[in-house]
Image (cartoon, rainbow, N blue to C red):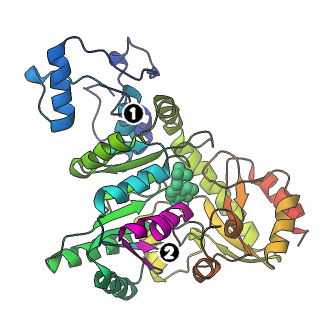
Amino acid sequence: MTKDAPKNLHLDTLTIATGYDPATALGAAKPPLYLSSTFVYPNSQYAKDTHANFFEGAPMPGGERPGYIYARLSNPNLDMVEARLAALDGGETAAVFASGMAAMTSILQAFVRPGDSVLYGRPLYGGVDWFLNSHFCQFGVHPVGYTDGVDANHMRACVAEAQKLGPVAMILVETPANPTAVISDIRLAATLADEIAATGAKRPLVVVDNTFLGPFLQSPLAEGADLCMTALTKYCGGHSDLLAGGVTGRNALIAPLKTLRTMLGNYSDPHTCWMLMRSFETLHLRTERAAANAKILAEWLRAHPKVASVTYFGFLPEGGPAREVFERQCRGAGSTFSFRIKGGEAEAFRMLDRLKLLKLAVSLGGAETLICHPASTTHYQIERARREAVGIDDATLRLSIGLEHPDDLINDFAQALEAI
Ligand SMILES: Cc1ncc(COP(=O)(O)O)c(C=O)c1O
């Protein structure tokens, strides 16, 4: 965006206008792709000043713009996509990583120490749950799961349980949760963090995984989150052809994440960043169309005799606490949800194997509609009892509705459901 760009732009405009100024690249209307691993300094003093700026935050003499050093530390395409994502999330700044998992595991490693506990919502994306409960716990970290993120009493009881094990360093909220679309109240998590701080303990960071709704349907930072993590692989990338993860928040929290990223080397490469800049430009249109399709499909599935239940945000009971949180916190129901068929694994597999248009694949947020059986795929590593306790059983199927015509999706479902 140029220096004299208008202020108070809408998100639809920011997703196109931020992060790139043609004046920085010979007037090229679209961002060039900087495929360079290293950057040439004009002289030795400039090299030293640039390093002092990067590692110590020292100002550049004469207010000169610091140069780039090496692509793993930062590079022009990474800077562009970080500026765009920060604008969309309303964060001071952003750090973009090689995948959602790279972002999430970096957040955990940057801010949690041995002996700390981490309060997290269940169900949680399988990869993060796996990391917490089979890897991170080996370093003396205590993961404690909560199951009802809108019930203050339940949440306070979980905080107390976590505090018995160690100081609560983080409250990790994935909302809506994967795959059952359970909602958590971000403001409640922020209030609990304040309550913990009021006792004299260190205030835990509230980290929200915003992957399912994305920046157009939910703004976790405005709701009180300290960090917002989005697996850009999904809706933001939008075409199932890249992996990336973004984190937005205050400078003071993003800086240590970037330092760790430099050490771990899990940055997002220039080509992926370039693709993301392009993807962002249609994110609002894709979000809208996929959400409209999802509503049609969710209603059709709910009325189908072979379907036992549909867990879709739009169906949250009127007057209930989850509905109240949904209406306050979200600007739409999104387009990933789950449903349960009448039957178990055998019936689910028979139905899946008859689909012709819908693709059987994990992941979500692409232009094409994807369906998967979480118990045997995304949540394979989570033991049955823990899975079933949060509603993921052998009859559960997760759908990520894409941009096809809804009638074609319905026709495919109609013929495949006959297999049950
Ligand atoms: C909610 C959520 N968070 C994080 C991730 C991890 O993202 P990635 O696959 O880019 O590592 C996923 C992946 O499916 C996800 O669904």
Where is 320 relative to 214, above or below? below
- The response on whether ligand 1 sits within 8 Å of label 2 is no
416 horizontally vs 242: left or right: right
Residue 417 spot, x, y in % from top left? 86, 67
Q: Quadrant of the C terminus?
A: bottom right
Q: Amino acid at mark 1?
A: Leu
Q: Quadrant of residue 312?
A: bottom right
Residue 379 spot, x, y in % from top left? 62, 67
What range of the chain is rendered magenta? 120-147
Q: Secondary structure at mark 2?
A: loop
Where is 38 relative to 346, above or below? above
Q: Is residue 229 visible?
A: no
51 horizontally vs 137: left or right: left
Q: Earlier in the sequence, mark 2 or mark 1?
A: 1
Q: Quadrant of residue 388?
A: bottom right
Residue 289 spot, x, y in % from top left? 62, 49
Q: Is residue 417 visible?
A: yes
Q: Quadrant of the N terminus?
A: top left
Residue 134 located within the stretch drawn in magenta: yes
Where is 243 relative to 401, above or below? above
Residue of label 1: 78
Q: In the current view of this chain or complex, which residue is farthest to the left?
A: 62
